[in-house]
Amino acid sequence: MTLRNSRLGAALYAIEDTCVVYLLVDQEARTAVAVDAGSGRWLDQLESYGVDAVTDVVVTHHHRDQVEGLPRLAASGARVWVPENEHDLVAHVDQNWQRRPVANNYDLRLDRFSLLDPAAVTGTMRDYGTRRIGHLDITTVPTPGHTPGSVTYVVDLDGRRHAFTGDLIHSPGKVWSAAALQWSYVGMEGAALTMASLELLLDHEPDLLLPSHGQPMKEPRAAAEQTTAALADLIEVRMGMRSDLPAKLAQPFIELSPHLLMNHTSESRSYVLLSDSGTALLIDYGYDLTTGIPQGGERFAVRPWLPSLRALRRDYGIDKVEVAVPTHYHDDHVAAFNLLRDVHGTEVWASSPVAHVLENPQDYDLPCLWYDPIHCERHIPDGTSVQWREYELDMHALPGHTLYASAIGFEADGRRVLATGDQQTGTWMPGMVAEIPNFQYANRFRPDDFAASAALYQRLQPDLMISGHWQPRLVDQSYLDELTRVGDEVARVHRELLLPEDPVFGGGARITPYRVDAVDGKPFELTVSSNGTSVRLTVPAGWDCQQIDDCVFLVVPHVDQPVRRARVAAEITLDGHYLGQLAEALVDVRLP
């Protein structure tokens, strides 16, 4: 097979394969770094490029036309680097093949256009980071659109800035795949995010766009603008309205007061407290600039990034987000916290109950947990205050929407402000439908929680309440009284409907940690909490279990091969009556 190639610079080749493979050559060492792998067949012609070996390959996204040749490259000794968000779609793609819904499928992401079998991965390319790969410094720019985890690699060569864009753009006004732009059954999520990614990529001032399919583009701004206009037309035809994404990208913040901003592009809404010292504090920060991204599910399906922060620099002179504080642990409020730490050195401060969930997600069986632990530099007990710059932040326990939540109080520009997360909808006005309490039982709800939060509001008397998904509300006494009425109603209907032994009242039985990773098959401890008078643990056949005290058990797994999600159950007895296996834990056993 003869592959066509073109020389784009003294040490840059474009090889036409299943995708365009770019070869960046170190002429003195006769080695090269490849952008994407294609089929790998081009390795047969390395000598024609003055190259003896490929030291590294960086992958823009996981699609099969980009990565089919990775096993061959790895076998030749090349190091393989993949986007952090798509690591599992290369290194553990067999798991996706096993889990991926096929029948009655409404998930239209093209993650089945992946490798058939896993490929060895050396490491990941982290969003916004610059890394030395081979003889080059390569900056990774998050550019979701073609896939949620797609990236562009920016490299300076011969005095020009090259952007290797993968399949973000094909040519001026064109994209490579229409199907890749539609991630859900009724949405155009990829199309909208492609628009945003093209705009944000221009911030890096590339001189040349180099796509995986298509020809190099020497006028990046004109190419991006032409493609963005075509995508806007597509969205309008499909969705019946013009995308408001360009306007949101340009102005993501609404100024509630000179020192308090609301990000109205994020899911959920985040808030920025500005310090006169030139730094900022964020209250919540999940998925910034969303376009209907499907949430939940596999890690590669969701993508935190930081597009709104460019406006903080541009409009407010903020170069550093110093602290991020969550109202609660849900992913739409905290997904970008680890990324903020990596990029800005941001510290996470959280109330003690929320901090424990963030740092130990494996301990909990709760909805909306983030995939990875989030380290918190400060654990702040509820009922106490902490100083940040010129502001004093007061932490208040706020169970209701979830047991692990805190209201955050502070004064900004002469107003008492209270951030309440997702506690209630925030839509009430006199004469309208009552304020809706936002409870989900799986979040560890209790009947009196909303009455307790209403009592807290009455005591604090805030001037402004800011929430996660609704408009900020100027507070008056009639609103506080309405929340008191709603809280009393929540308690009443549950006490009338439910039996006292219902988990909503008693808390139910639980095993902690809920997810166990038994590395090298080592023994591990489990703690059972319940209202039972006696507890015993059921473990898989052949395993050993020793009860250490009334509620703590030592489990010894005996396996001769790795195990995924073995089940352990807690058998609960109350006053001599066996209630059954009321709680479970899941155990992965890894062997050396």
Image (cartoon, grey):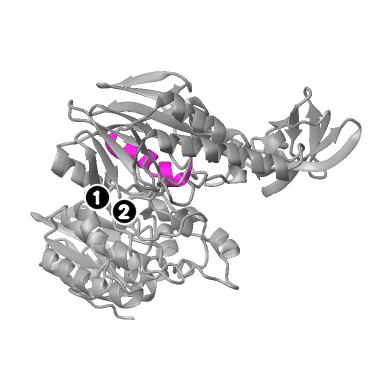
Residue at position x 26%, y 22% in the image:
389
**Three-letter amino acid code at the position of disc 2:** Leu
Amino acid at the residue labelled 1: Pro
Q: Residue furthest bottom?
A: 1
Image height check: is 92 above or below 100? above
Q: Let me know if residue 146 appears in the view.
A: no
The x and y percentages for residue 106 are 52, 70
Q: Residues within 10 Å of mark 1 (few under 14, many from 20)?
A: many
Q: CA distance from mark 1 to mark 2?
A: 8 Å
Q: Residue 186 falls in which quadrant of the image?
A: bottom left
**Quadrant for the N terminus in the image:** bottom left
The image shows residue 79 at horizontal and vertical percentages of 37, 52
Disc assigned to residue 252: 1
334 in magenta: yes
Q: Is residue 9 left or right of residue 322?
A: left
Kindly identify the residue that appears in the image at 42 percent across and 37 percent down.
478
First in sequence: mark 1 or mark 2? Answer: 1
Q: Which mark is residue 434?
A: none
- Judged from this view, the residue extending furthest toward the left is 159
Image side of residue 580 versus residue 286, left or right: right
* Residue 86 placement, left or right of 130: right
Left or right: where 24 falls relative to 522: left
Contact? badges 1 and 2 (CB < 8 Å): yes
In magenta stretch: residue 5: no
The residues colored magenta run: 329-344
Q: At 75% from the left edge and 29% from the top edge, which residue is drawn? A: 553
Q: Secondary structure at mark 2?
A: loop
Residue 93 visible here: yes
